[in-house]
């Protein structure tokens, strides 16, 4: 499995494809809403194309983002919490 996403043989530039998939996944928008947002920005693409891009590229993009995430370390920080129960502070 390769770690890079290949956008070969696609009509639109990788930036547009990545942005459309990111909008769809990150903000829980419908395909038609993403289509409308891109149309407002001057990119005429159908919602069906966005669906295909999401099905094809979203798992690869998510995998790459997970690899970039910082791993949990050995140092933990705990903030102080005060809770009032029946008028008494704990």
Image: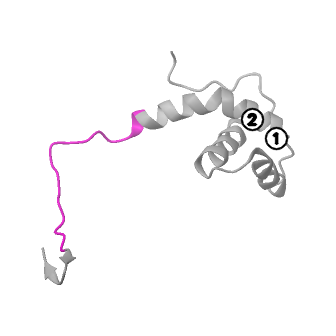
Residue occupying image coordinates x 63% and y 30%: 57
Is the stretch drawn in magenta largely helix, strand or loop?
Answer: loop
Residue occupying image coordinates x 17% and y 84%: 87
Quadrant containing the C terminus in the rendered view: bottom left
**Crowd rating for badge 2 (residues with CA inside 10 Å; few <14, some 14–19, many 20+):** some
Circles 2 and 1, Cβ within 8 Å, touching? The answer is yes
Q: Locate residue 10, reporting x and y percent.
A: 77, 27
What numbered label is drawn on residue 51? 2
Q: Locate residue 67, reporting x and y percent.
A: 41, 33
Residue occupying image coordinates x 75% and y 30%: 52
Q: Locate residue 58, reporting x and y percent.
A: 60, 33
Left or right of 70, for residue 17:
right
What numbered label is drawn on residue 74? none
Q: Locate residue 51, reporting x and y percent.
A: 75, 35
Is residue 63 something that shows in the picture? yes
Query: What is the total number of numbered labels drawn onto the structure image?
Result: 2
Is residue 12 something that shows in the picture? no
Looking at the picture, does residue 63 appear above or below residue 16?
Answer: above
Residue occupying image coordinates x 56% and y 29%: 59
Task: Name the secondary structure under disc 2.
Answer: helix
Task: Name the secondary structure under disc 1.
Answer: helix
Residue 83 on the magenta segment: no
**Where does label 1 land, which residue?**
47
Left or right of 77, for residue 34:
right
**Crowd rating for badge 1 (residues with CA inside 10 Å; few <14, some 14–19, many 20+):** some
Q: Which residues are magenta?
A: 67-82
């Amino acid at each position: 499995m390769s770690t890079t996403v290949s956008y070969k043989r696609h009509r639109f530039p990788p930036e547009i494809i990545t942005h459309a998939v990111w909008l769809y996944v990150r903000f829980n928008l419908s395909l038609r809403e993403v289509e409308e947002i891109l149309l407002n920005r001057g990119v005429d693409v159908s919602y069906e194309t966005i669906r295909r891009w999401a099905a094809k590229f979203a798992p690869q993009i998510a995998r790459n983002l997970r690899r970039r995430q910082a791993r949990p370390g050995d140092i933990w920080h705990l903030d102080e919490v005060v809770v009032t129960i029946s008028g008494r502070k704990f």
